[in-house]
Each structure stands twice: as C-alpha cells, then as structure tokens.
Image: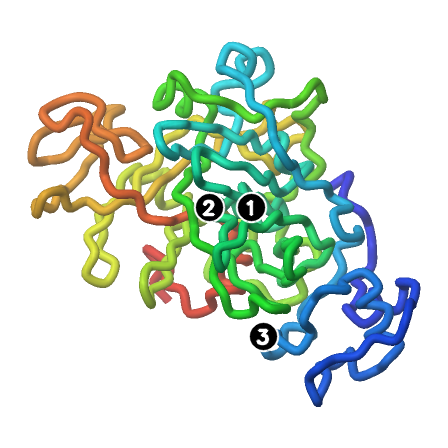
Amino acid sequence: MQEIRKILPITLALVALLLPATGHAQLSCETPPAPFDRPEVLENWQSVWDLMDLCQYQEGVFSEIISGGVGRDGIPPIDNPAFDDLNVADTWLQDASPVIALEIDGIARAYPLAILTRHEIANDSIGETPIAVTFCPLCNSAIVFDRRVDNETLRFGVSGLLRKSDLIMWDDVTQSLWQQLTGEGIVGAHTGRLLDIVPSQLVGYGAFKEQYPHGEVLSTNGRFYGNNPYVNYDSTARPFLFFGEPDGRLFATERVLGVALGDLRTAFPFAALSEARVINDTLGDVAVVAIWQPGAFSALDAASIDLSRDVGMAGLFERTIDGRTLNFRVDGDAIVDEGTGSVWNVFGTAIAGELAGTQLRSINAFPHFWFAWAAFYPDTELYGYEP
C-alpha cells in the first residue's frame, strides 16, 4: 500500500470540527443524533452537507463512519463518460486486465478497474437506464446500480467517508449517504432505501471482447492509467481503516463471490471456485451454478495492474431452463452440462452444442474481500466451511 495515505482515523465529529462554521444550523427533530447535539459540530457539518436530513439515519451508524482522508469528491467520480471501440482499447489493455462488464438494451460496455481505482464511481447512461458503476478498492467490491430513486435520477459522488472500510457514496439531490457494498441509504432522506442493482460481472478484458465483439470500453481521455495505488493490498491481514475483528473463517482479504438472495447470504471463496471451476448448488429453493475461469488480473496486487497475478473471474446463475435443472461439470478445459454436453462460458452463455445461444439467468453476485462481506453480512454462510 505504498501510495495509500498514512492517516490516522478521524471520527465523524472531528471531521465536522475541522470544517469552517457558517450560519446557525437547526434540525427539525427534537433529539439530534450524536455528535450533532453540539451546535458547533452541526454548523460545521452542514456547511458542507447543507441539504442532508440528519434526522433520518440508521441506528448506530454515526459511531461507525470515519474519514477516508479526502473531502467530498476529493476522489473525483466520472461524469458524462466517453467510450472507445475495442481497437482503441486494445492499445492499452491486456486480455487479463480486469473490467466491469455489462449489457443493457444490446449495448455492452466495459469499465476497466485501472480507471475505477482512481475514480471509484462512473455516472453513465445506457439507453434509457442511468447507472452508477462503482468500485471500492479497499473492499474489492465492484457493483453497478440504477441511479433512479423516486422518479429522480441521482448523480453519485465519493463522500470521502468510509464505514467498515467501504466506500460511502452521496447523491446530489438529497445529499443522502449510501453504502456502496449494500446499496443502502444510511443517512439522509433516503435512509433505508435500496438502490436497484444492475447485473454485471468483473471479468478479464479478453473475456469481454469474446462475449461482446462490438462492445465499448470506458475511455482514458488521453490520461495514463494502469498503476495500482494499493500495492500488495490484497495480501494484507489488516485491511486499511477497518477497526472490527475480521471473520476468522477465511483470510481477511481472500476473495469471495458474495450473493444476497432473499433472506440468504452466501459466499463462495475464490480458492474453492478456482479448484472446482464449477459448483452446482441450491440456495433456498433456487438451483444455482457458480462458474470460474482464469484470465483476470488482480487490480490490488503489483504496482502495475497488468503485471499482477491472475485471480480469475466468476459468475453465479440459475441453472433451471424451461423447467429443466441442469448439472454442470468440467470436461478438459470446458464447462459442459451433463444433459446435452453443451459448452458454457463464465457469462452463463452456451457457446457450443445443442443449447448454443442459450443464456442462463444471472444472479446478482459480486467479488468482495471476505472481511468486508462478512462485516456487512455477519450471518453469511460460507461455502465449503466446516467448523
């Protein structure tokens, strides 16, 4: 972590006290939440967050919010992003360069982590769908959200605040604070609201090209990207600005594919996925398959992302099609279903055989560091774990 700022954690109250006071702030609620029961703290806070409704918040959240060392949008999100075709992207990306991939209305786009480690949020629109493409490097969490809430399209930014080491986003309409890993409003008018998740996958650029030969890639706009500001971070036992006790079932920064399905929370370790390559499972009453394949670099390993180790990529899908539940297995280098012998890829697409062209229904499951997933979902099941 050579470039991570070596700062001491600053509590929410201290952050507020460091800001210039203006005016005389008041709250409509009878009992202000601590630390805002002190007028000078409230005034300082509202000099920056002047639209935020501090009367609405998750219980206990203010004791967990700390400063990440930068101010609001001190890490600048990308607004109105530009895109290049694959020929241009080929000039600077390798096949294993990690990208967030998604398709909406026939438009496929890739967002390289080389760019998102520096910006963390890209506010984009694909067709009629406004989206926020987000990546928290400290938690290795890559998630895409729909930016529409109550018929308003929000612009999301980086608040400069963290909770359990995870990025806290803010919106430009109500200045509510949103937890990136869960997509939940935690302070402000949208407290308790959940952003809709847009299906996406974190994959290698080569896999994206193969799946979407006419895809688009987030443009560098002439800037150089590719250096990792979090060198060796995914090998650390003590995550940055995380003050809880990591769940001891796995190493803190081991990658897991985390899924929240109904009331179930489950994590598939990448170590188990890479060994098996395909896992047939059932979550509640949903038959699922987790598919892993090599070909994606870590964005949080070596100083150059494209010189980092291959950690692979994974996806989770329903394995029932037209009432028939498929079982999958490894056949040489291929993933096949036992019923038809059709060949499938990491996107859940049949690419050869009787079912060629068939698409499994994607389940929202994303890579995270284990410590972060378990911190927000402490009741999570861990695939393969035996006490």
Front tag of 3 and 2: 3
Amino acid of disc 2: Pro
Q: Residues within 10 Å of mark 3 (few under 14, many from 20)?
A: few
Image coloring type:
rainbow
Q: Residue at horizontal 44%, vertical 38%?
A: 128
Identify the image quadrant of residue 301: top right
Per the rendering, the mark at residue 367 is: 2
State how far apart marks 3 and 2 are (Cα).
25 Å
Amino acid of disc 3: Gln
Of the image marks 2 and 1, the number of the one nearer the N terminus:
1
Task: Read off the residue under disc 1.
Answer: 140
SS assignment at label 1:
loop
Residue contact between numbered discs 2 and 1, judged by CB atoms under 8 Å: yes
State how far apart marks 1 and 3 are (Cα).
24 Å
Tell me if I can see residue 247 in this picture.
no
Q: Is residue 83 left or right of residue 106?
A: right
Residue 28 vs 378, above or below: the answer is below
Give how far across and how far down residue 82 sits, in percent: 60, 25
SS assignment at label 3:
loop
Camera-side residue: 369 or 205? 205
Give how far across and how far down residue 142 sits, in percent: 51, 44
* Number of numbered discs overlaid on the protein picture: 3
Residue contact between numbered discs 1 and 3, judged by CB atoms under 8 Å: no
Q: Residues within 10 Å of mark 1 (few under 14, many from 20)?
A: many
Amino acid of disc 1: Asn
Q: Residue at horizontal 40%, vertical 17%?
A: 214
SS assignment at label 2:
strand
Q: Residue at horizontal 52%, vertical 23%?
A: 217
Camera-side residue: 27 or 18? 27
